[in-house]
Image (cartoon, helix red, strand yellow):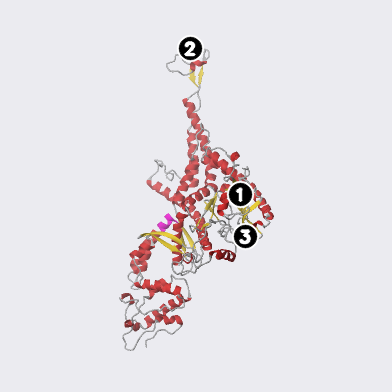
Amino acid sequence: MADTTKSITKKAKKVTSAKKAKPVVDKKKTSKETRAQKAGENMADPLDEDDRERLKDIDFQDLINQIKTEQEQAWWYIKPKWDEWALRLKLYNNQKRDKEAVGDNTLFTIFQTVLASLYSDTLTAAFVPRESGDEETAENLDVTAEYDHDEMDKDILDYEWDFEAMFFGRALMAVMEFDREQMVPVPEIWNVMTVLRDPFAKSVNGDKKGRGRARFLGREVRMTTNEMDDMDVYFNHKDLKPTGTSTRSLVDENMRITADAAGLSDISKFQNLKGENASHRLLEWFTIYKGKRVFVTLADDMNKVVRYHELDTMDIPLIDRVIYPIPNSWDGVSIPDLIEDKQRARAVATNLALKGVKSALHPMYLFDETRIKNRNDLNFEFNKFVGVQGNPTGAVQEMQKAAVKQDVQWILDTLSQGAERSTATPDIQQGARPDTSGTATRDALINQKVDTRYSLSAKVFGWSERRFWKQWYRLYKNHFEDGIDEKSVRITGALGAQWRPFTRENLIANTDPDVKIESRILSEARRFNELQSFRGYVQFMAADPNANLRFALRHMGKLSGLKKDIIDRLLPPTIEEMRAEDENIAMRENPDQIVEVLPTDDHQAHLEIHNKMEDTPAKIAHINAHKRAMMLQQARPDLFPQDPRKTENSGVKDENIAPASAGENMRPVADAARGRALPVAQ
């Protein structure tokens, strides 16, 4: 995934690591050096005057001509689909419908039912380390991701992301901004109605080999000069003229049809505002130029480049989400694709039936003109007498016509069933009372099968969620400077809210971690089943004297959904575990200093803690020393007269604990780290 393409940038303050002091860094010098060392200039940094002057001197005419041809091809390709989307937006919520007619809400009802189900089933992200020593970093990333979820307004973004994926078939989220003041990525949903794309693209970035990747893709936006100044990444934009509306502009036409569907007026003819609030129509475009992926912004009807950046990868920093994907197809299937025709047919049938009911209340009559000479005598009035010539019987009678037949209800039911089956939204799922012919068992089976259908969509959504959190991690990796940046994360635990400072070494792993995405409902069910199985296994395992019951209890707490700090309160670290943690710090800060392994160490507890540390020569040597001590303990138990787990002085270096035989003492087992022979009695 590409580096960021625009960012909210602030000057970072110098901070000190929570673990050890960091050297003072000259930021003015580091900023340019860091950018120069990377494959592409860091787009999170604002442009300085030298950058602006350099970019102004570049001749971009060939690039402008290339983008114009790409934009024209993409516009003609998407135009029929765009027109259909515009009609469907009115169908979803048309405030300008005929006031004498009745609108059908099948699309809205089913759409909101599916959206509510998928949105309420939160997708959880967990970072999984790829190598030993990154376990603590993965836990820090889990905590930071949970904290950033609120900071990024991810709940709002998820609603918009899900909505657009379900309505248009595919939705796009840009993950390419990083707010260095708040130290958090700033994702943004791209309005599909303003996006133009490569007609041959199957997805934004294609498969693992990049096949089917979009060659070019972009969107139209409107910005004021002040907004461009605030971002501080534009150049050559001070003399731009305000841009009027155009029927070929997606952003302008989207505003028009959205206003029309909402019952508002078209203000496109009033778009030419004066003063600082006048806006400019910009085209933000990803394309390939001179063998590199570039991000370009054009202004003045695509005649002037006001932003240019070369990415260090061919991937575009956009995450696409689909709901019903079709292999090797960009669009897939959307909910309006399945419901639109049925809603239109239901609306026609409903309005015809309504007219039939009205006609029954206000029927047409036949009257004998030889008996009733004045037609106005038939107008209705209370207590009115109408004179007729001769016998009044048969002078007026109701005109016979066909009544509303049961066929209309059958058609409506058939259309509803087709819409419900295609999206797995029966009445009970919509919150409506089911028909009386059903039973509790049948309703339970229906709910079970509905969950199965929805779980498929949740898993498909998980594809994009995993890509999102991977890109989230990359933004930290690219922008979180070592020795400069620090992020404070609020953690709510057993002792209340706490603030934990994180630096780069706390968040960036030795090897990029994997991201595991699970539906919260499915993960809770799976964890419950694992807990039941593990609890039964522990009952049999407890009879083994060598069983690590503390680990078993910790793992059972994790499977029960308890947070780490609560488990630590229930099972506080032992003296041996705390000593091992101190040894990890000592080996990390002074890798050349030998950390001794004592004969009284609980080697199993030490190995468990040491394995959490990143791999270093000091760590490997120290672990080998523990292993050799365990081998010696088995070969020469007389050198270890007491079980260290039962000794009050466990972990304390005391010469009195040495073997009781006269003239004997122990050389530290840590000599094994230096390649010396195994410790022997002397």
Indicate the secondary structure of the residue bearing disc 1.
strand
Q: Quadrant of the N terminus?
A: bottom right
Residue occupying the point 37% across, 63% down = 565
Q: Are marks 1 and 3 in contact (CB under 8 Å)?
A: no
Q: Nearer the viewer, residue 175 or 635?
A: 175
Of tags 2 and 3, which is closer to the observer? 3
Q: Is residue 134 above or below residue 523?
A: below
- Measure the alpha-carbon separation of dots 1 and 3: 24 Å
Is residue 336 among what the camera can see?
Answer: yes
Q: Nearer the viewer, residue 630 or 191?
A: 191
Residue at image mark 1: 282
Q: Quadrant of the C terminus?
A: bottom left
User: What x and y, as percent, mark residue 381?
Assistant: 45, 18
User: What x and y, as percent, mark residue 651?
Assistant: 35, 76
Of tags 1 and 2, which is closer to the observer? 1
Magenta residues?
A: 518-526
- Measure the alpha-carbon separation of dots 2 and 3: 102 Å
Determine crowd level at label 3: few under 14, some 14-19, many 20+ residues with C-alpha closer than 10 A.
few
Residue at image mark 2: 388
Which residue occupies the extreme top position in the image? 390
- Measure the alpha-carbon separation of dots 1 and 2: 78 Å
User: What x and y, as percent, mark residue 69?
Assistant: 67, 51
Q: Is residue 551 above or below residue 92?
A: below
Q: Amino acid at mark 3?
A: Asp
Give the mark nearer the N terminus: 1 vs 3: 3
Residue at image mark 3: 50
Q: Amino acid at mark 1?
A: Leu
User: What x and y, as percent, mark residue 129?
Assistant: 47, 66
- Whether residue 416 appears in magenta in the rendering, the answer is no
Classify residue 389 as left or right of residue 436.
Answer: right
Is residue 533 among what the camera can see?
Answer: no
